[in-house]
Image: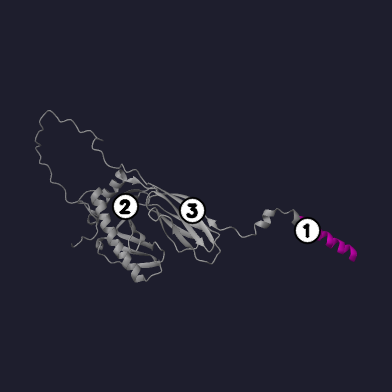
Amino acid sequence: MRILNKRKTVAVLLLISLILSMLPCKDLAAKKKTKMKFSKTRITMKVREDKYLKIKNNTMKKSVRWSTSNKKVVSFDSKSKHDCWLVAKKAGTARITAKIGKVKLTCKVTVKKSRNTNGNNTSDSIPSPTPSTNPSVTPAVPTPAPSSEPSIKDNWNTLKNYILTQGYTANDGSRGIDKELNNFNYVINYYSAEQIFKFSCFQDVSGSTSATGMFQMKISENNLTDASLTYDIVFTSSVIYGGCTATASVPVTNENTQFAWTVIKGNIGAAQISNLANKSFAVAYTGWNILLMDTIGNNFTMEKLGFLPNPN
């Protein structure tokens, strides 16, 4: 009986060995470590669009060194081991590189123009009526006096209608107007589905200290008195970076306003980040003012939308 049991044991072991030898090699290879790589090796973007580039299967404890071959085409903001936030600045190509120890990952980014530049009105789109040959009759009832100044709500509607009819279509489906001054791009978008206005300012400051940053202000059409602010900046060397948020009351806000910022990231002091954010808001506010006056009309300013008048 003992001999029989031993034979059964040997037979079972042989059967297990046979089954293991028949398993596909890929089942064993699956246990090996998965190769680290970018989620995409080629990305196409449009100007003012932002996208995330992710690193897959990064289990290394070493820090990631990010770089761009052309900061004027694509800038980035990241201190993460797993992803990088890309911001398209102007049409062209650039390569984003991530170095982790001896591993080097690259991704080619192609930036295209976001819209056609031919967005101006044409004076001959509607033919002028032919003058009447009969003299006009003076009305018996005097013409009513012009109504009072448009309300703040009326001005917001004017801005919305202008953007929807004269603005370009952005990559995210919104409609927008923009203006570029020096190294700053000022943009106002309207999102019909969310009924939200988004004011943006993209900065690319070059000089003794080069940096890129983005400032955004969102205002709901259902609540035109409150705004949410976000500010993000990274020096091109990636040595200094920061981001913060704040809320604003529109009736008491203009370019001189100093906000109470909540710092959400950064490797410098909260006071420094807040100071940079307040200075950037002053620049952004001034640019939005110029954008409104150049598109809607010379008298259409941020003040028309309910913002605090400038004492100067």
Residue 17: give its label: 1
Residue 94: give its label: none
Spatial CA distance of label 2 from label 1 is 69 Å
Find residue 174 and report its horizontal and vertical position in percent: 36, 48
Q: Mark 3 points at which residue?
A: 107
Spatial CA distance of label 2 from label 3 is 30 Å
Q: Residues within 10 Å of mark 3 (few under 14, many from 20)?
A: some
- For the residue labelled by badge 3, is the local secondary structure a helix, a strand or a loop? strand
Q: Quadrant of residue 119?
A: top left
Q: Quadrant of residue 183?
A: bottom left
Q: Which residue is drawn at 29% across and 49% down?
A: 160
Spatial CA distance of label 1 from label 3 is 45 Å
- Tell me which amino acid carries mark 2: Ile
Find residue 33 and report its horizontal and vertical position in percent: 61, 60
Q: Residue at x 36, y 67 (%)?
A: 262
Q: Mark 2 points at which residue?
A: 188
Based on the picture, tell me whether residue 5 belongs to the magenta stretch: yes
Q: Which of marks 1 and 3 is nearer the N terminus?
A: 1
Q: Residue at x 36, y 64 (%)?
A: 245
- For the residue labelled by badge 1, is the local secondary structure a helix, a strand or a loop? helix
> Which of labels 2 and 3 is toward the front?
3
Instruction: Kindly check if marks 2 and 3 are in contact, taking CB atoms under 8 A apart as contact.
Output: no
Q: Which residue is drawn at 80% across and 61% down?
A: 13
- Tell me which amino acid carries mark 3: Cys
